[in-house]
Image: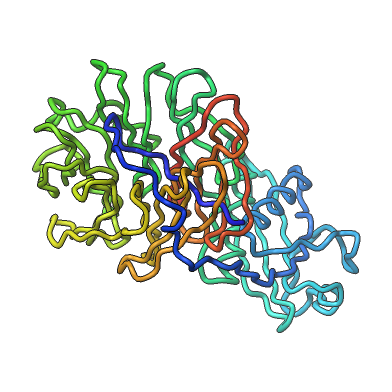
Amino acid sequence: MRAISLAAIAVFCVAFTAADARAADRPSVVIQGGGEQKFAVALQKFGGNFDAEAYRESMVDALEFSSLFRLIDRKAFLGPATTEVLSERDEVGCLEWSTIGADIFVEGVQRLEQEQFIAEFAVWDLAGCQRKLNRRYRQAASADPLMLARRMADDIVEVLTGVRGVASTELTFVSKRDGNPEIFVMNADGSNQRAATANRSINNFPTWSPSGDSIIYTSYRSENRPMLYLSTRGRGKPGRILAPLSSNPLYRAVYHPNGRELAVVMSPKGSAEIYRVDLAGKNPRNLTRSRAIDVSPSWSPDGDRLAFVSDRSGSPQIYLMDSDGANVRRLTFNGNYNTNPAWSPDGRWIAYQGRVGGQFDIWLIDPEGSVNLPLISHPRSDESPCWSPDSRKIAFSSTRRGSAEIYVIDSSGENLRRLTRSSGDDTSPAWGPFPR
């Protein structure tokens, strides 16, 4: 049975109270497996003076992470297992590769040269014996060459599907593996997990800037109350942000798709409300004006609408409003405890966590509210859904093995993969944008 990813109940210090939803509330519609036929790929080891085996394995992992490819064992190759020189037009030997069942043939070369790492590769469509892509990358020798292998795999996904792959993207999340909840970052496949904070306070709700250079998160590190901080590897200055609003508890912030504004949850008058502000914290505009608790904003991809959570109907439900706060309408009616909406980058779906039968599951609903169904169901709770930038995958946290860990699953409900295996809870994932 498919498991529904329970979105972390990010209602800050405010606890919504509601009765358990009944199992009878579950709609009869279920998502069926996509059953997509995978591309069979013959991938040569890249010739050159770098660790070619490690480079190939990184590409294999990245292609398999996409869930779109099946790698052909090199023992079945009729042609060479290693690229010596990239093939000229029509000289790749398409028949040799298609005979072993390959749809796609990938060849490449790489080398370290004068403090630079250079890699070039070509992708061949064997049915028509046509070279679909020939691309060269160049980066500093000190940079991670295996990340470049992931970018190449993402290029292969793009040339075959029209949408770039996400193996070279990153996730941020909250982990208690060192005792306190700190902000961590990892590659999309779970590799290279590292801490972004180490302040020994309570840190939560990380979210990426559209450029991928910065992460905004909530921390109690100052005055023991929630404030917003910036962790950056770009031009921004790290540290506490939104100084003009610092007299208010600041629970959470998410970037507008334009990267110049934020939707901020704060409580200047008691209950939490959603405001729209610029990055300097000036010109705050109150978008929600009710005595209810309004939290968890999520922008539509075009920035024209916001999904959010409110208990104005008596229990937490997902609502929509225009970017100026107008035209508020309730979106979810199934179940009596629905939180943490996450709008897909293609605009087609809003993922959220809903409680049905005593546990939280991840549900999908379209922005018009005409289709509402569970992505995956499991006796343990699944939480905090977030979308990959290509809208093909959803990451979430789950307690299905005891402590909370981060998982990823295709938007079809297939190919579940566990990303973290730490000794403490890992929660609140947020998926970064495509690298630039």
- Nearest the viewer among 423 and 217 is 423
Q: Residue at x 63, y 48 (%)?
A: 417
Could you tell me residue 378's position as x and y percent?
57, 48
Residue visible at 70% across and 70% down in the picture = 39
360 relative to 84 in the view: left or right: left
Give the percent coordinates (x, y) of residue 223: 23, 15
Residue 275 image-quadrant placement:
top left
Q: Position of residue 182 (x, y in %)?
A: 44, 25
Q: Nearer the viewer, residue 369 or 424?
A: 369
Is residue 387 shown left or right of residue 92? left
Query: Residue 422, relative to residue 393: is it above or below?
Result: above
Count of labels in the image: 0
> Can residue 61 be seen in the rendering of this structure?
yes
Q: Nearer the viewer, residue 405 or 61?
A: 405
Q: Position of residue 160 (x, y in %)?
A: 60, 71
Color style of the picture: rainbow
What's the residue at 68%, 53% (across, down)?
59
Q: Is residue 33 above or below residue 109?
A: below
- Which quadrant holds residue 205? top left
Residue name at image x 60 percent, y 69 percent: 34
Q: Quadrant of the image for the N terminus?
A: bottom right
Q: Is residue 436 visible?
A: no
